[in-house]
Every structure is written in C-alpha cells, then in structure tokens.
Image (spheres, rainbow, N blue to C red):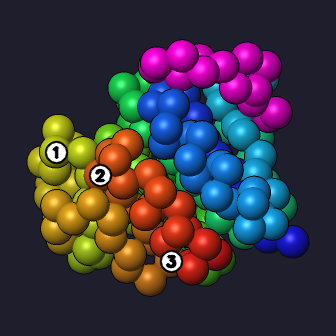
Amino acid sequence: MKKIVFVVAPEVFRDEEYIEPKTILEEAGVEVTTASTVVGEIYGKIKIKAQSQMLAKDIKVDDFDGIFFVGGGGAAVYFEDETIHNIARQFYAKGKLVSAICIAPVILANAGLLQNKKATVFPDGADALLQNGAIYTGNSVEVDGKIVTGNGPQAATEFAEALLKVI
C-alpha cells in the first residue's frame, strides 16, 4: 500500500484541496496521514475540521511514498520553514512524490525544488515561483517528473488524479 503525508496548516487551509485529494487517494488504496504544526483538530477556511495525526517537523521520509502540501492562506506558515523545506528536499532526493496546490507551491519554490521545473501556483504566488527559477505555466495542474503542482481549489480533482499517476 502506498502512503502519502499531507502537510496542512493548523487553520485556514482550503477545505476542498484537503478533502477531494484525500477522498480520491484513499478510494484508490493510498494511506493518507495528516501532519501539521499541531496534533489534533485543525480548521479549514470554509467549514471542515480535520485531525492531524503528527507534527510536520517529525515526518520521516522513509515512512512515506510522497508528500503533499495543502493550500489556502494558512500555508504561509511553511513558506520560510527551513525544517519543512529540508523534509521536502529529502523526499525529492529520494525520488519520491513532492506536491503542492494553490499557494503552497511557494513552499517548494522557497525550498529550491522548482528551479528549472514546470510548475503552477495560485496567481498570487507566481512571482515567488519565478524568483526561485521555476518555469511558471499558469496551467491548472503541472507535472514535472515527481513534482506535481496545482493552482487552486477548482483543480483539486485533476490534481489528485495526477498524484495517483505519479505516486
């Protein structure tokens, strides 16, 4: 069974960017673990409450086949988080899935993972991707090797389907 860890902000994450990929992946037999800056209840922007099973800083790369950064305004908590950047780099270095949607691709850009890679992001994050050497496409979903990026909640289903192909 494949395993993926969702890295989610403790609050103001995009509900549909969490729920739709989680549902699609689990229905396909992928085990999903949710990690955040807290263990316990976390809160979506619109209405959902979810449960974080572990602290994001404690993610062990060898325990998972991929990592997914959920978007929404709360994702900014990880923009400059060097511990999280190092974890993302380790996933990439081991040839595992590294993915992010909405504004969260800024995390990957700031970690140095999008240099010379095709990527997309919510329009507000385009400058951050470009400044970090990404090839910004503006597409709803972009796959470049083991890196998958999506540009927002309307792309959540297409994004999840891309994750299944890459993982």
Of callouts 1 and 2, the N-terminal one: 1
Residue 105 pos. (x, y %): 36, 51
Marking on residue 133 = none
Marks 1 and 2 sit apart, C-alpha to C-alpha, by: 7 Å
**Secondary structure state at the residue bearing disc 3:** loop
Of callouts 3 and 2, the N-terminal one: 3
Is residue 53 one of those drawn in magenta? yes
**Secondary structure state at the residue bearing disc 1:** helix
Q: Residue at label 1? A: 123
Along the horizontal axis of the image, is 85 left or right of 29?
Answer: left
Which of labels 3 and 1 is toward the front? 1
* Residue extent of the magenta highlight: 40-55
- Is residue 8 at all visible to an observer of this figure? yes
Observer-nearest residue: 33 or 114? 33
Q: Residue at label 3? A: 146
Q: Amino acid at mark 2?
A: Asn
Name the residue at 29% across, 75% down: 117
Of callouts 3 and 1, the N-terminal one: 1
Disc 1 to disc 2: CB gap under 8 Å: yes
Marking on residue 151 = 2
Residue 149 pos. (x, y %): 38, 61
Q: Main secondary structure of the magenta part?
A: strand
- The image quadrant of residue 166 is bottom right
Name the residue at 60% across, 40% down: 19
Disc 3 to disc 2: CB gap under 8 Å: no
User: Label 1 crowding class (10 Å Cα cut-off): few <14, some 14-19, many 20+?
Assistant: few
Residue 92 pos. (x, y %): 55, 71
**Secondary structure state at the residue bearing disc 2:** loop
